[in-house]
């Protein structure tokens, strides 16, 4: 746990590689709020232990930033909390379920953990904005439209100037675009950049400042621009991805095999399929 403001903590999961997400904790007077629950029991229990080392306050709320399993798989370990998310997150979680065998094939080292999961969707849902009053603190839950998924939540603490961005922001990691609307994602980042933010906790990767929002937007804008050129030239998405070269700062981002998926999602947008 890294304290990013008084009583506000980021739980960082190292490299941010596939399956290893960040989480968060906000501690108010006599109660606490957790942000995301991680993927499998071993990861979720470690997060719970880290919480207990910091506070005895009960976790009153668990906020799910979106429905992907690396962020909500551990919900079952927070049953005493009200699980809060955007309404689309709940719908997407129920639709996706827990495809154990597919997950185990993709991430075999977590296979036994996937088999222990019980789908525990959010119970308290909102549409555009929700303000939670937590032991003397204000925690703003913001939905700015479809982006990384249809149900993304940004967790914003205005007084502390901290933004838990979920997977709207990846740092030094190629974004996972499997359910993304990339143009919408850029719009979400544009709105997030209007917030008074000093610290950004990404969904994957190390802490950043408000420049992390700019860097993520620029990455997506570059890929969108190059994919659009290839689309207009009549190239298939696979060839467009092969030709796309991300130089400089973005060249070393981890998990580059996600880039072709991102290009395919952009082609779907350009064909009007999203």
Image: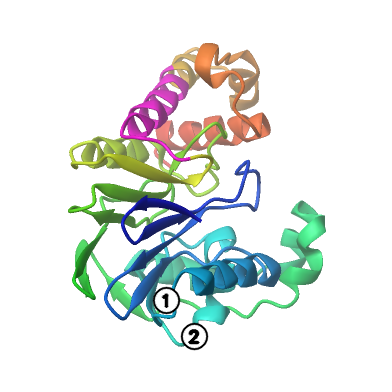
- Picture coordinates of residue 126, whole percent (x, y): 26, 70
Is 39 magenta? The answer is no
Q: Earlier in the sequence, mark 2 or mark 1?
A: 2
| Residue 130 shows in the view | yes
Magenta highlight range: 207-225
Q: Secondary structure at mark 1?
A: loop
Secondary structure of the residue carrying tag 2 is loop
Residue drawn at the location 75% of the way across and 52% of the way down: 106
Residue 149: horizontal and vertical position, in percent?
Answer: 43, 52
User: Which residue is drawn at the image coordinates 46% and 45% (left, top)?
Assistant: 180
Q: Is residue 9 left or right of residue 265?
A: left
* Disc 2: which residue: 79
Q: Mark 2 to mark 1: distance in Å?
A: 10 Å
The label nearer to you, 2 versus 1, is 2
How far across and how far down the image is residue 74, in percent? Answer: 58, 72
Give the camera-side residue of 45 and 180. Answer: 45
Dot 1: few (<14), some (14–19), or many (≥20) neighbours within 10 Å?
many
Name which residue lies at 31% across and 81% down.
Answer: 30
- Quadrant of the image occupied by residue 55: bottom left
- Is 123 on the left or on the right of 94, as rendered? left
Residue 274 on image: x %, y %: 41, 45
63 relative to 119 in the view: left or right: left
Residue found farthest to the bottom = 80
Q: Are marks 2 and 1 in contact (CB under 8 Å)?
A: no
Q: Is residue 10 above or below residue 252?
A: below
Label disc, if present, on residue 122 of the rendered structure: 1
Asked if residue 224 is among those painted magenta in the image, a careful observer would answer: yes
Report the disc number at residue 132: none
**Residue at image coords 76%, 54%:** 107
Q: Is residue 151 visible?
A: no
When the figure is inspected, residue 175 is found, relative to residue 153, above or below; the finding is above
SS majority, magenta: helix
């Amino acid at each position: 746990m890294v304290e990013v403001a008084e009583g506000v903590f980021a739980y960082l999961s190292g490299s941010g590689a596939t399956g290893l997400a960040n989480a968060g904790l906000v501690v108010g007077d006599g109660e606490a709020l957790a942000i995301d629950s991680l993927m499998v029991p071993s990861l979720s229990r470690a997060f719970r232990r880290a919480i207990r080392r910091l506070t005895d306050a009960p976790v009153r709320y668990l906020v799910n930033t979106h429905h992907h399993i690396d962020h909500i798989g551990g919900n079952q370990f927070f049953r005493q909390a009200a699980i809060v998310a955007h309404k689309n997150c709940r719908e997407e979680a129920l639709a996706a379920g827990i495809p154990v065998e597919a997950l185990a094939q993709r991430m075999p080292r977590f296979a036994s953990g996937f088999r222990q999961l019980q789908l525990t969707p959010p119970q308290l849902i909102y549409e555009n904005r929700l303000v939670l009053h937590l032991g003397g603190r204000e925690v703003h839950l913001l939905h700015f439209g479809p982006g990384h998924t249809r149900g993304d939540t940004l967790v914003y603490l205005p007084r502390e100037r901290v933004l838990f961005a979920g997977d709207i922001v990846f740092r030094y990691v190629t974004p996972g675009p499997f359910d993304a609307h990339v143009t919408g994602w850029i719009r979400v980042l544009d709105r997030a950049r209007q917030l008074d933010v000093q610290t950004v906790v990404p969904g994957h990767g190390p802490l950043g400042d408000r420049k992390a929002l700019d860097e993520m937007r620029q990455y997506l804008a570059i890929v969108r621009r190059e994919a659009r050129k290839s689309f207009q030239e009549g190239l298939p998405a696979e060839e467009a991805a092969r030709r796309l070269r991300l130089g400089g700062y973005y060249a070393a981002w981890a998990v580059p095999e996600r880039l072709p998926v991102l290009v395919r999602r952009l082609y779907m947008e350009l064909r009007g399929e999203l």
